[in-house]
């Protein structure tokens, strides 16, 4: 399959072949599901914590004698039945990440990109290099490339720090527009946005990841 290549201004700049094989219809759905679930689970901090009776502040003295008061027997005011006491079976710090094999992640990314390309939701541009930081200009260019998209992801292959700075600074105040480097593109990002704008170099880097 070939994709039309455009410039940021919207003019035609030729065509570029997609270097990876599309996933057949009905295949790869489980890989996409597992990869997205694992990605979202990995975003959880897992730092929620409640103190148990050994960690709360308080005396260790027995509050009243064992017998003769008519009250229930107890040995500490730091148990869960008293105000200020510890929490029983409360949350503890934990790691929510899930293991997904590299081949499964690769299949999921290839499946997601295949579907987005078939639906015409991937826009290929010759370059995302900007001469300077200009939010208004970039906003108009994105609107021209994807007029119906409410959210857009810009995938670049820029290596120069100044060029990356120009792109990121220009895009950061545009609502629902994000920038990502081609080497860190993942299945969740591919599915999250209404449209993907990839530079020609970024597509080559992604293709290399999917064919290794």
Image (cartoon, rainbow, N blue to C red):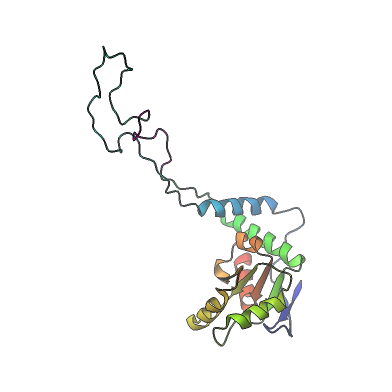
Is residue 206 part of the magenta span, yes or no? no
Our reading of the magenta stretch's main secondary structure is: loop
Residue lying at the far top in this picture: please name it. Answer: 68
Image position of 102 with respect to 195: above or below: above
Residue 74: % across, % down: 30, 21
Residue 141: quarter of image:
bottom right
In depth, the one of 55 and 100 nearer the eye is 55
The residue depicted at 25 percent of the width and 24 percent of the height is 63
Image position of 151 with respect to 37: above or below: below
The residue depicted at 35 percent of the width and 33 percent of the height is 83
Quarter of the image containing the N terminus?
bottom right
81 displayed left or right of 193: left
Q: Is residue 43 visible?
A: yes
The residue depicted at 48 percent of the width and 80 percent of the height is 161
Q: Is residue 22 visible?
A: no
Image position of 115 with respect to 174: above or below: above
117 displayed left or right of 97: right
Residue 113: quarter of image:
bottom right
In depth, the one of 207 and 186 nearer the eye is 186
33 displayed left or right of 43: right
User: Over which residues does the magenta segment extend?
Assistant: 81-92
Residue 105: % across, % down: 60, 57
Residue 142: % across, % down: 67, 77
């Amino acid at each position: 399959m070939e994709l039309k290549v455009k410039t940021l201004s919207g003019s035609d700049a030729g065509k570029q072949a997609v270097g990876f094989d599309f996933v057949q219809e009905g295949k790869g759905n489980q890989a996409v599901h597992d990869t997205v679930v694992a990605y979202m689970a990995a975003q959880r901090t897992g730092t929620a914590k409640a103190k148990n009776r050994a960690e709360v502040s308080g005396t260790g003295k027995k509050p009243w004698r064992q017998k003769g008061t008519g009250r229930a027997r107890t040995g500490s005011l730091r148990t869960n039945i008293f105000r200020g006491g510890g929490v029983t079976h409360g949350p503890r710090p934990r790691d929510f990440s899930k293991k997904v094999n590299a081949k499964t992640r690769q299949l999921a990314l290839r499946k997601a990109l295949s579907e987005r390309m078939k639906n015409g939701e991937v826009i290929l541009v010759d370059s995302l290099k900007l001469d300077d930081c200009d939010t208004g200009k970039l906003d108009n260019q994105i609107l021209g490339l994807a007029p119906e998209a409410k959210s857009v992801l810009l995938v670049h292959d820029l290596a120069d720090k100044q060029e990356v700075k120009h792109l990121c600074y220009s895009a950061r105040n545009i609502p629902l527009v994000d920038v990502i480097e081609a080497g860190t593109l993942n299945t969740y990002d591919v599915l999250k946005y209404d449209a993907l704008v990839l530079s020609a170099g970024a597509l080559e880097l992604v293709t290399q990841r999917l064919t290794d």
